[in-house]
């Protein structure tokens, strides 16, 4: 940046150098009245961006205020300032946006483009990076920025380029990933009707003549005012058994802060920002193994992971892959992964993984060994195809070692017993929205339930609720404590020692490493 904080450009004092933007450098500045503004110093005196921006007056474009020249004779222009963040930054934190909010945002953007195109202006850089969301407003409150590549007058091809940009943003809002070519519809959410899917497919069709001709027609299709025919090549149906879990993702997880941090920083970060991962040559993870005592919420965290990632999800039991025919299970395994690739990105969740990939050295059954070999083949770099595997087990020592190598299962994570803080959160979660007396002390309940797992705490609360319901009374502290006394935890100190030994062997960590936390 050529200017730093507290320097002046004309009569404007620099508050913060924002960074490079197409065609110039962007700064946050104050005018002589002390008001914040955006100021852009253009790279060339031949730039037409300032004069073009002067003529645009729309509520979704920052209002033009002033123009001038720097001491170096470069032109600059000034626009209003809004407290904002780029849409791209919002989507890194919130990969998907509810359908209604997405529709509102895209409809507003199309109305803006309809007006610009009617003035013969095409923006030519429609992207999430060039849209500022007003932090004080809703999804209709944004500003389109960066007109460095805008043209006037524009031709149909340039209009089409703008509309494709809108289609790519719509795809990203709905599915949480960038659109690829050839176009595939991943993560089919039950909230998304076929009409919206058809609109997305048409906006990004490979053939220009099949895309929307104007922002007005695109807008009417989005609002359901005109019908859009289905593109049978794009709108492939999701294989049976795949769904998108409904819930709050990691917000529904009690405790387990270190595990959530690990998954966010080592797994979800790479999955969400594929372009950056490819730029830095980061390895796309294939999957993870969650192991630990029964009842500690391994299935729950797998489902919440799928929600957090915004991925389709399939729960796979060993019986789903069973077959009475020789090599029949191998064929089913191959079909399962092919279906997963067809609706990628998705999560395949394998419960009781040791039953699917047992140690080949311990079996003399050729069919079982063949099934393990098929899993090894399918797991190899499946992450590159958008398939993330989550496997859970209570007996990791029974899993074939070849399955657990890097490039197949990349992360092996111990899910421990809940500590006191996690148990406290679990009681709060399970008692929420139930008729409770004012005397309930969740901290005391947490102290009374050492060695209890998530399912046992849920059982204690459910039994107390059942007792209260019989007489239509409130759930009380006494009811909960009585049910704690009547419920014996099934995890023993000896079994925990065995799991700690497994943990040291699998992860090669010291036994005193801090516990991660817990899920409900």
Image (tube, rainbow, N blue to C red):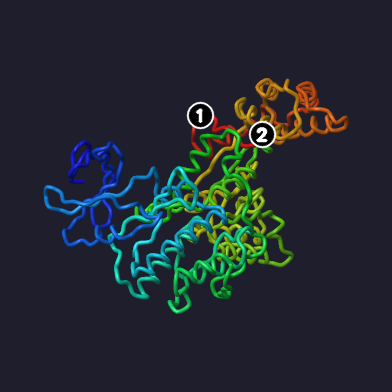
State whether residue 437 is above or below residue 219: above
What residue would you read off at disc 2?
Answer: 429
Q: Residue at x 27, y 60 (%)?
A: 148
Q: Residue at x 55, y 75 (%)?
A: 233
Q: Quadrant of residue 415?
A: top right
In the structure shown, which secondary structural element does the residue marked by tag 2 occupy? helix
Q: Position of residue 97 (x, y in %)?
A: 53, 52
Horizontally, residue 81 falls left or right of residue 479, namely left
User: Can residue 369 be spotted in the picture?
Assistant: no
In the structure shown, which secondary structural element does the residue marked by tag 1 occupy? loop
Q: Quadrant of residue 503?
A: top right
Q: Residue at x 49, y 33 (%)?
A: 509
What residue would you read off at disc 1?
Answer: 513
2 vs 1, front mark: 2
Horizontally, residue 406 falls left or right of residue 238, namely left
State whether residue 436 is above or below residue 365: above
Question: On the rendered image, what quadrant is the C terminus found in?
Answer: top right
Residue placed most toward the observer, 47 or 228: 47
Q: Residue at x 45, y 75 (%)?
A: 213
Q: Earlier in the sequence, mark 2 or mark 1?
A: 2
């Amino acid at each position: 940046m050529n200017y730093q904080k507290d320097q002046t450009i004309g009569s404007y004092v620099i508050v913060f150098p924002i960074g490079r933007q197409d065609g110039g450098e962007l700064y946050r500045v104050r005018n002589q009245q002390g008001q914040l503004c955006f100021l852009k110093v253009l790279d060339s005196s031949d730039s037409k961006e300032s004069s073009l921006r002067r003529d645009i007056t729309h509520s979704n474009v920052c209002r033009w205020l002033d123009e001038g020249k720097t001491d170096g004779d470069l032109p600059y222009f000034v626009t209003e300032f809004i407290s904002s963040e780029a849409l791209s930054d919002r989507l890194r934190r919130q990969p998907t946006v509810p359908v209604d909010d997405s529709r509102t945002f895209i409809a507003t953007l199309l109305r803006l483009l309809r007006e610009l195109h009617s003035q013969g202006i095409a923006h030519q850089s429609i992207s999430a990076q060039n849209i500022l969301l007003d932090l004080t407003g809703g999804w209709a409150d944004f500003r389109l920025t960066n007109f460095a590549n805008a043209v006037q007058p524009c031709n149909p091809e340039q209009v089409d380029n703008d509309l494709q940009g809108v289609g790519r943003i719509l795809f990203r809002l709905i599915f949480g990933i960038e659109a690829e070519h050839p176009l595939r519809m991943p993560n089919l959410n039950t909230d998304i009707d076929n009409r919206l899917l058809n609109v997305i497919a048409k906006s990004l069709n490979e053939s220009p003549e099949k895309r929307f001709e104007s922002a007005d027609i695109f807008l009417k299709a989005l609002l359901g005012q005109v019908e859009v025919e289905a593109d049978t090549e794009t709108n492939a149906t999701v294989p049976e058994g795949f769904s998108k879990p409904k819930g709050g993702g990691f917000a529904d997880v009690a405790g387990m802060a270190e595990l959530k941090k690990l998954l966010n920083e080592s797994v979800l970060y790479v999955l969400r920002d594929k372009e950056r991962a490819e730029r830095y040559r980061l390895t796309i993870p294939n999957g993870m193994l969650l192991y630990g005592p029964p009842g500690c919420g391994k299935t729950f965290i797998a489902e919440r992971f799928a929600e957090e990632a915004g991925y389709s999800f399939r729960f796979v039991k060993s019986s789903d892959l069973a077959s009475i025919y020789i090599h029949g299970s191998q064929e089913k395994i191959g079909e399962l992964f092919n279906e997963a690739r067809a609706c990628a990105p998705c999560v395949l969740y394998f419960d009781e993984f040791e039953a699917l990939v047992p140690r080949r050295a311990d079996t003399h059954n050729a069919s079982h060994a063949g099934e393990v070999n098929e899993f090894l083949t399918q797991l190899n770099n499946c992450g590159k195809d958008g398939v993330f595997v989550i496997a859970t087990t209570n007996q990791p020592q029974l899993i074939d070692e070849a399955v657990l190598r890097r490039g197949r299962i990349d992360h092996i994570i111990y899910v421990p017993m809940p500590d006191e803080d996690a148990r406290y959160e679990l009681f709060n979660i399970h008692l929420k929205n139930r008729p409770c007396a004012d005397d309930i002390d969740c901290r005391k309940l947490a102290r009374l339930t050492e060695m209890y797992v998530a399912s046992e705490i849920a059982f204690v609360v459910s039994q107390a609720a059942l007792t209260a319901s019989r007489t239509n009374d409130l759930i009380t502290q006494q009811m909960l404590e009585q049910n704690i006394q009547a419920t014996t935890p099934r995890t023993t100190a000896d079994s925990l020692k065995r799991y700690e030994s497994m943990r040291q062997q699998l992860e090669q960590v010291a036994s005193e490493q801090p516990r991660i936390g817990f899920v409900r």
